[in-house]
Amino acid sequence: MTTEDLVMKCHLIVGLFLFPAATGSLLASDLPLWERLTPQQQMVLSSGKQVVLEEEIPDNPWPKLTIYQLVKSSSADVAAVFWNSELDTKYLPNCKSARILDRPSHDVHKAEFILRMPLFLPEELYVSRITIKSPSQNVYEISWKVLESRYSKECNGMIRIEPHGDLALFSYQNFVKPRSNFAGLLRWPAQATIVDSVKSLVRQVETEKQKNPQLLAGQLQAVEQAVGLPPGSLR
């Protein structure tokens, strides 16, 4: 195994959740998220657990994952936390640095992320273009595309957030096309890392609502500006 392969192997285990990638439309169905699920899956979500779906992709060692989860918050709250890329270091494991490089428009920013690597391995840096939109009232979509990465061939993804009664329901989809020949051996630990990162997002949203409403209010203001809503409409 070469040094680059070794770096790749460790990188994928500790940082895959930061490298979503997909081909084509991630959320092609026009149905509301809840209606895309079976009654059994709806029961799982209502119990507070995730629904994790896999789609095998030809000639790729990793599947496309779709993770559904309910959150005790509004859809705007989830979008506000996710849109704040510079907050990633506070709740996502192994994210050492996250900073905005550019804001080409009100609904787009380009961010640089640095991942902490184990032992003697060098840190990993990548740049992502992140876009937010609100296709209908109280519905939000945040998509991202990695522009620079040492370890993946193509990277992009999307989270869609919708209201569901007094809760928010989101669908997080990603797919990674890695460069490493050893990627197939890391499928299960990599998937576990993605699932845990989504749980971390949910915990951060619910923690802010309970313990740091001032931070959440500022993030909601940023979403208002990004999607063109009147000031104060989300607070």
Image (cartoon, rainbow, N blue to C red):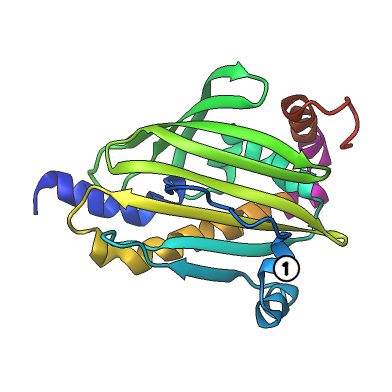
- Check if residue 208 falls in the magenta segment: yes
In terms of depth relative to the viewer, which is nearer, 137 or 4? 137
- Give the percent coordinates (x, y) of residue 48: 71, 72
Q: What element carries label 1?
A: helix
What residue appears at the point 34 percent right and 57 percent down from the top-left corner?
Answer: 13
Residue highlighted by disc 1: 35
- Give the percent coordinates (x, y) of residue 110: 51, 25
Q: How many labels does the image show?
A: 1
Location of residue 108 (image quadrant): top right
- Give the percent coordinates (x, y) of residue 179: 23, 47
What residue appears at the point 87 percent right and 60 percent down from the top-left corner?
Answer: 166
Dot 1 alpha-carbon crowd within 10 angstroms: few under 14, some 14 to 19, many 20 or more: few
- Check if residue 74 falls in the magenta segment: no
- Give the percent coordinates (x, y) of residue 125: 36, 33
Q: Is residue 141 above or below residue 107?
A: below
In this rendering, position of residue 187 left or right of residue 113: left
- Say which amino acid is labelled 1: Glu
* Quadrant holding the C terminus: top right
Q: Main secondary structure of the magenta part?
A: helix
Report the residue that reaches farthest toward the left: 1
* Quadrant holding the N terminus: bottom left
Over which residues does the magenta segment extend?
Answer: 206-217
What residue appears at the point 26 percent right and 60 percent down from the top-left corner?
Answer: 59
